[in-house]
Image (tube, coloured by chain):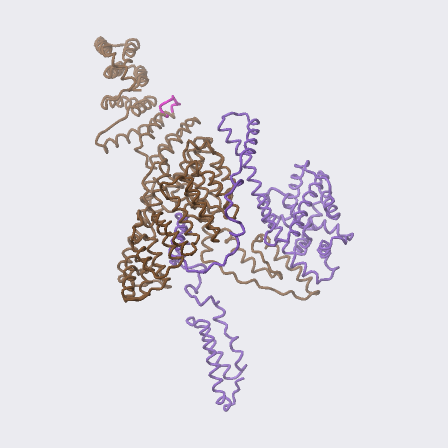
Chain colours: A purple, B brown
Amino acid sequence: MLWRMSAVLPLRLLSRLPLCSGGPEALAAAVVLLGASPGAVRFFSLMHLSRAQNNIQRYFGTSSVIYNKKDEQSVPTHEISKETESQDSVKENTKKDLLNIIKGMKVELSTVNVQTTKPPNRRQLRSLEATVGRLQRAPEDAPKKSESLSPELVAAASAVADSLPFDKQTTKSELLRQLRQHEEDSRAQKEGERPKVSFSNIISDMKVAKSATARVSTRPVHQIQFDEGSDDYGGQEKTADLRKSLRKNIFKGKRLNIFDLKAVTEEAPEAETAPSLWDVEFAKQLAAVNEQPFQNGFEEMIQWTKEGKLWEFPINNEAGFDDDGSEFYEHVFLDKYLEDFPKQGPIRHFMELVTCGLSKNPYLSVKQKVEHIEWFKNYFNEKRDILKDSNIHFN
Amino acid sequence: MAAAASARWLRVRCRLCLPLKSRRADPCEQAPSCRFYSESAALPNVEGADVTGIEEVIIPKRKTWDKVAVLQALASTVNRDTTAAPYAFQDDPYLIPASSLESRSFLLAKKSGENAAKFIINSHPKYFQKDIAEPHIPCLMPEYFEPQIEDISEAALKERIKLRKVKASVDMFDQLLQAGTTVSLETTNSLLDLLCYYGDQEPSADYHFQQREQSEESEEATEENNEKSRKKAGPQLGVTWRAKNNAERIFALMPEKNAHSYCTMIRGMVKHRAPVQALNLYTELLNNRLRADVYTFNAVIEAKALMVNEKFEEKWNNILELLKQMVAQKVKPNLQTFNTILKCLRRFYAFGRLPALQTLREMKAIGIEPSLATYHYIIQLFYQQESSAKGSPLIIYDIMNEVMGKKFSPKDPDDDAFFQSAMRVCSSLRDLELAYQVHGLLNTGDNWKFIGPDNRRNFYYSRFFSLLCLMEQIDVTLKWYKDLIPSVFFPHSQTLIDLLQALDVANRLELIPQIWKDSKEYGHTYRSDLKEEILMLMARDQHPPELQVAFADCAADIKSTYENQDARQTVPDWPANPLNYIAVLFLRAGRTQEAWKMLELFRKHNKIPRNELLNEFMDNAKASSSPDQAMEVVKLASAFSLPICESLTRRVMADFTVSQEQKEALGNLTALTSDSDSDSDSDISEGK
């Protein structure tokens, strides 16, 4: 197994980007594996995971467009990207490809995220072992059907399971369950067509809500524990549940029913007025609310920077130099203003000297420099007759 | 945020080495992947070369960073040093404060130094003209607070308003009127703003710092005192609206008035506690068919609640009526509207509870996110008295479930009171789990900034720590002790007593000498209740010899503080209990000499030693087989006419070889005692 994976690895590492075009399913598989490998990657929270997935998905947009231009046969992965886009046309060899993809991506992603300096082979093996270890831990969770998943994914998952020397059935069903879940998620996201609400937001919201409810259930238990001082845990739990169901959430119930949500949220054109003294003072009060003494020297330096007592980072020779936000190159590269001048000859020579001088002048603004060049243009225009006499052409 | 900024900053460098064709839109993509990108980029380029030609290379735009981004990133790497005083106090070692009192005076001293310097610079600007900084640093130069425009014009009036010269502005306005110049509506309105905000008084010369009147208050009184100090902290202390003041006069003189003029007048009247006039003016505003803005409505709501001689129900109906008027006038309520209502409902006691909940739900329903102050008001309303907490103990759990994990930004001036009141409830409910939740919320994001000024932080942490002492395992409590003290707060003596009791419960008395050392450091050297607690715990039981030695050292140290105290005070006073405890501790540690000296002190200060102490002395005398000492004990007992005298005498007779002389003396003493047996009962009760 080690040999097989390491053979796949270098190639896959190189072709990481095209691999990503495997579509949400393949990606989901990768994420499943990534998520399932604990230990080094354990710190990876659900939110991070989903965000990583999201980013990579977004990345497909560009990459698939790029690869569409290429020869179909030259890159095998391209087939997959296309294949997942149109799911009905299933080719024979895609199964193998997908399997490769899943394996390759998994290795890659876990190494990438762990950012280890160890040789990737060993790491990958270990994480695989860890994966299986964890999968074995929850064999009961093995789910039932696999209708919603496309057949090639099922095959790929089973291939992955086969490649592992552990309980194959468990591994496979665990994989499939995760895959299905991710497929559902990604489909929901696709259909939802809510560009602003990202997947990660949904996931993170879910997480918050869940932990909150968990807290609700634990909370009254302790409360009663204290109140009654008894140790009968089971009985308390019941009472706690009862109490929980009996009591109302303070946020649910009758409200005043005076204001209307629509009326309040609709954007009324606000007349722009200068802030009055009241506004200014209120803002000051608010600013004072979370004013705390400095926690360290850097915070003090931040304050000094804001007050203008310190050099601003990054420290360069443009401190205190403000020319309406124009960049240094606008000051230095002035050749583009010489297009209207002759390409050669004494005028050109003269003007190049002028721009050279201007580019070294820190005291003029860009606008002034351009005006300066303009002045010469007009000047030479006015003197066109004289120039013609002396056989010099201006335009 | 700063951490994110630093991560992004680091990535810039990675990004530059990416010759990738694609636009990397999302800067949040994880940095580690960069390593692989640089390699993998080779493949698509090679493949792409013969098929599609060279991909277009889009050089990423140069990122401009905030001037403090680097510093923020650095600041986020610095953690709190649990062994030192907070950064703000770090100074010359001699000056570093070690108690809450010292820390306060430290901050005041520092600030007043700054203010004094600023005052000198601003009052003598002509001596501070030399500008040595390059580039120029404006904030180091004197500010000009004197009006520059001399002649009588609207511009001069505007300048005076801008400089907040109340009297000068009014004079200028009058002069303009006398000269027959009409002042524009806008300028008049801003003059009214000035007059109404400051209640027609010159604003106090504040140099961005107002010394808050917060003396060392007892913890229980903090709540009420906060109310007071908040009012005092306002720009004008106790300024009330005077009838016919300049604001009213100018308002009456105005040829045309718009909504702003009315609004600012109403707000000023409410701010300076003239609700009746404010409501009258509001009616006038309605009669003139003008619309009040949301701030004015907030003020009027407050005015309705301030009205005296009205029932709660009446007031509440008035407030509802106002809200309906807001809907009718299409004025959108804001957070302040609801916070004002809740703030007022706080004073309605039990009546306010249902309306408060309805108000909260209304807020949520129309999508106004409650701020910390909102929850603070609700908590105050539902947990007004510690005893009444029983009636509504569950509200706080709902609130905590709601706010858990959220990061707050300042939206209301009362936002900084939430944590204090939440911790107060935790402590009255004795719910450690909840306290941990509150503390977790405090440490979410930048929420810790809402802990408020010094006294609130002390209150919060003392309550939290007392709860820990009460409910948590001693090891965890000690961990918190090390973590919080002194880097977060300096403990009250009550906090230390709580800790001592926790040590007692957990049978970890060996730590007491260490606690005594700490309490000396935190300025509790002369707290007799703390010292008595320490001595009591040390003297209560017998301990192994090494521990007794340590305890005796500690007792000697405490004894010396009493002696020093004597020197400071005109009337030296030794309470009886510490004398007993110290003597016992000396005896048990084998410091017999000192113990006997303690016995002298009893006589000197006319305090009554306990029976157990005398017995221990007797044991000691026996151990050293010194009948003289035994005699001494009996003499002392008889001097105080203690009933134990008899039994002591018997012991002396039985255990010691006494000379004839001594026997006689003993006989005399006993006779003396039996004579005064009648009043010895009262002595006992006193001595105990």
Residue in front for this viewpoint, A81 or B189: B189
- Which region is colored magenta? B537-545
Relative height, residue B604 to residue B249 (above, below): above
Image quarter of residue A81: bottom right
Query: Does residue B78 show up?
Result: no
How many numbered circles does the render carry? 0
**Is B544 contained in the magenta span?**
yes
Against B644, is B264 above or below? below
Query: Horizontal placement of B319 versus A180: left or right?
Result: left
Q: Position of residue A217 (x, y in %)?
A: 56, 34
Q: Position of residue A10 (x, y in %)?
A: 67, 53
> Is A209 in the magenta?
no
Residue B597 relative to residue B48: left or right:
left
Give the quarter of the figure containing the C terminus of chain B. top left
Q: Percent position (x, y) of residue A138?
A: 66, 37
Residue B674 lies, with reference to residue B541, above or below; the image says above
For residue B646, which quarter of the picture?
Answer: top left
Q: Nearer the viewer, residue B113 or B36?
A: B113
